[in-house]
Amino acid sequence: MSFALVMRRSGLTVGRTMARFESTANTTTQKAAESAKQAAAQASAAASKATQGLSRVASTAGPAIANAAKGVSGALGRVGGRTGRLVAFVESQTPLVVYYSKVGLEMAKLVVKGQNMSPPSVSTFQTYFQNLWKQLQNPSTFVAGLAQSVNPQQVRNLSRTQVAAGGVLLAECLGFFTVGEMIGRFKLIGYHGENPAAHH
């Protein structure tokens, strides 16, 4: 046998082996791809089943919780007297409180952003509250420090402008308190007095 013939036969053998290897690799790749597709389909089916189960639970629990809340508020609303009026008042004021708290929060965000304000650091909070806690634990030192800070000699040496500024500040505080009372009572004139016949 000639060398060329041996090489041709070995080339054919190598070619057949390579062809078999390629077909085996293609089959293995196809099987792996099919199993991956099946696993992905099973995972998506399980996820959709889980989502359906959660939505069923949420759709069942949501109305149940709402019905329970309505039942509780209805039972509290049926309570008569002062308690019933208080519950009705709280229920009527809740939307206003939620609305104005949201408005206040948004206004605070705008002010903080517009003024380039930043909250104090954690260490500032810690030192402030540690000092406050120490003063609450030992109020006698706080009272003694307050008594030392108010010196009678300083009170005698106040000028007329300082006394006038203090009077203006006191008038401002009294005015704000009065306006707050008017808003709180929804009346300009004082509290309702008791009926004199009720004393008998």
Image (spheres, rainbow, N blue to C red):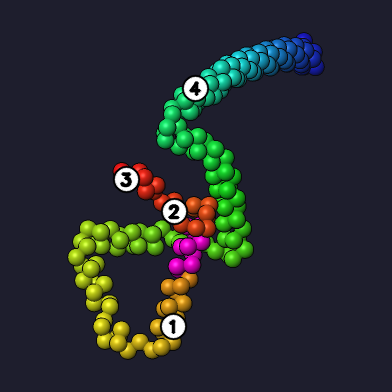
Secondary element at image label 2: loop
Closer to us: mark 2 or mark 1? 2
Q: Amino acid at mark 3?
A: His
Q: Amino acid at mark 1?
A: Ala
Dot placed on the residue nearer the N-terminal end, 4 or 2? 4
SS majority, magenta: helix
Q: CA distance from mark 1 to mark 3?
A: 45 Å
Q: Amino acid at mark 2?
A: Tyr
Closer to us: mark 1 or mark 3? 3
Q: Quadrant of residue 10?
A: top right
Q: CA distance from mark 2 to mark 3?
A: 18 Å
Residue displayed at 31% across by 43% down = 200
Q: Which mark is residue 71?
A: 4
Q: Which mark is residue 164?
A: 1
Q: CA distance from mark 2 to mark 1?
A: 32 Å
The residue pinned by badge 3 equals: 199
Dot placed on the residue nearer the N-terminal end, 2 or 1? 1
Residue 98 seen by the camera: no
Is 130 colored magenta in this rendering? no
The residue pinned by badge 2 equals: 191
Residue displayed at 52% across by 58% down = 188
- Give, as a single range, the part of the protein colored magenta: 173-182
Residue situated in front as seen by the camera: 58 or 63: 63
Secondary element at image label 3: helix
**Relative to 2, does residue 186 appear above or below in the rendering?**
below
Dot placed on the residue nearer the N-terminal end, 1 or 3? 1
Q: CA distance from mark 1 to mark 4?
A: 60 Å
Image coords of residue 118 (percent x, y): 52, 62
